[in-house]
Image: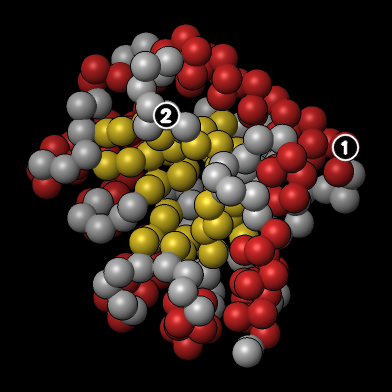
Amino acid sequence: MSGIADNLARIKNSLPNGVTLIAISKTKSNEDILEVYNAGHKILGENKVQELIGKYNELPKDIEWHLVGHLQSNKIKYVIPFVALIHSVDSWKLLLEIERQAMKTGKRVKVLLQIFIANEETKFGLDEEELIEICEATEHFPHIEICGLMGMATNTEDMNVVRTEFKSLKALFDKIKLQYFSDISSFKEISMGMSSDYQIAIEEGSTMVRVGSSIFGER
Ligand SMILES: *Cc1c(COP(=O)(O)O)cnc(C)c1O
């Protein structure tokens, strides 16, 4: 087995039931990605539209592609036909454009709303007030299925900070679920945790971990 397949197997075996692994393949070659695919893992994620489209065209069509990075609304239309889940919806404007493009294709696009939980200037995401505004207006987005929330913790060695941020995302998810999605069974995902912190994220209630470098190696 290659290093990549070994890493994948080790991580997959460590995940509890109900936690989905998204293998983040950004900057990695098709050859590397095929090692994961041939080991039986077909759920992959990219953070850039251009790169995602290239890989979608070149790689097997039964790969389930997730988009995890900050998105410009003018690029949305290229991924709508095939993307399985957009994790990073962080503005009203983006939501409107996804609705417009999804309507054209007649399909319902699955998204997560990205919440700002870090204490850094650099991370994208909605605050609680913006989240609530969106949740109160879902009738404007009939072609969008809101499947849950996503968040990225502060990039720090201090795992107490990371844990506190994950806890706050879980608490917000529970509150929003109860208030707006209590009878909508598809609102169930909390996408949190990357290579450095996915174990903590799982302890705090993550249902989707986005792991790149621990599978594919450093970028
Ligand atoms: C790159 C990336 C990841 C994976 O990061 P690793 O540290 O390599 O596991 C997860 N989520 C997002 C949004 C990313 O851009």
* Rendered-image quadrant of the C terminus: bottom right
Image position of 170 with respect to 193: above or below: above
Q: Residue at 89% across / 44% down in the picture?
A: 158
> Hey, which quadrant is residue 120 in on the image?
top right
Q: Which amino acid type is marked by label 2?
A: Phe
Q: Type of residue at label 1?
A: Asn
What is the basis of the colouring in this image? secondary structure
Mark 2 vs ligand 1: CB below 8 Å: no
Q: Point out the image quarter for the N terminus.
A: bottom right
Q: Which percent across, then down, holds residue 72?
A: 38, 48
Q: Residue at x 38, y 39 (%)?
A: 111
Q: In 3D space, how far apart are the residues under numbered discs 2 and 1 (Cα atoms)?
A: 28 Å
| Mark 1 lies on residue | 160
* Residue 215 visible in image: yes
Residue 159 percent location from the top left of the image? 86, 43
Q: From the viewer's perspective, is residue 205 above or below residue 105?
A: above
- Residue 4 horizontal side relative to residue 147, left or right: right
Residue 202 quadrant: top right
Q: Residue at x 70, y 51 (%)?
A: 198
Image coordinates for residue 56, horizontal then vertical, percent = 32, 71
Tell me the SS state at disc 1.
Answer: helix
Q: Position of residue 144 (x, y in %)?
A: 27, 33
Left or right: residue 76 versus residue 212 is: left
Q: Which residue is mark 2?
A: 187
Mark 1 Cα shell of 10 Å, populated few (<14), some (14-19), many (≥20): few
Residue at the location (41% across, 18% down)? 181
